[in-house]
Image (cartoon, helix red, strand yellow):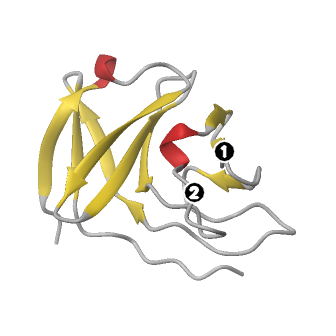
């Protein structure tokens, strides 16, 4: 079951950047790619907990600013040979508004 919440306008997220949404004690990074795709991950790298929202977005990945791990935006999983996953949150854009489902998708790294 989805619990969609209207969080912001897509233009509030810079191209190749992120904005952070707080839900309780959890920070969620909402990313926007150069192709205007939007993704949402817990703002915590699976390696050492670095703030993914402060990383560099390239293609459909973000590079953690602490140790340069590459994280897939569509899954939250680290690119091999690194392992681990940040929690992913379903997100959609309708009428220029970004909607976030606050129920995380749990993934296990392969």
Residue 72 percent coordinates (x, y): 64, 53
Query: Quadrant where the C terminus lies?
Result: bottom right
Q: Is residue 7 left or right of residue 89?
A: left
Residue 50, label in figure:
2
Q: Which residue is mark 1?
A: 65
Q: Quadrant of the N terminus?
A: bottom left
Crowd class of label 2 (few under 14; some 14 to 19; many from 20; radius 10 Å): some
Q: Are marks 2 and 1 in contact (CB under 8 Å)?
A: yes
Q: Secondary structure at mark 2?
A: loop
Structural distance between the alpha carbons of marks 2 and 1? 7 Å
Going from N to C along the chain, the mark reached first, 2 or 1, is 2
Above or below 69: residue 20: above
- Tell me if 100 is positioned left or right of 32 in this view: left
Residue visible at 51% across and 51% down in the picture? 51
What residue sits 68% from the left and 33% below the top? 59
Give the quarter of the image for residue 94. Answer: top left
Residue sitting at 37 percent across and 24 percent down? 13
| Residue 53 position within the rendered picture, expressed as x and y whole percent measured from the top left | 49, 42
């Amino acid at each position: 079951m989805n619990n969609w919440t209207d969080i912001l306008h897509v233009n509030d997220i810079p191209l190749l950047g992120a904005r952070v949404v707080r839900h309780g004690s959890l920070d969620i990074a909402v990313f926007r790619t150069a192709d205007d795709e939007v993704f949402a991950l817990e703002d915590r790298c699976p390696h050492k907990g670095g703030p993914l929202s402060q990383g560099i977005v390239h293609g459909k990945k973000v590079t953690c600013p602490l140790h340069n791990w590459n994280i897939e935006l569509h899954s939250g999983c680290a690119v091999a040979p690194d392992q681990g996953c940040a929690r992913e949150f379903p997100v959609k854009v309708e009428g220029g508004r970004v909607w976030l489902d606050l129920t995380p998708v749990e993934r296990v790294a392969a």
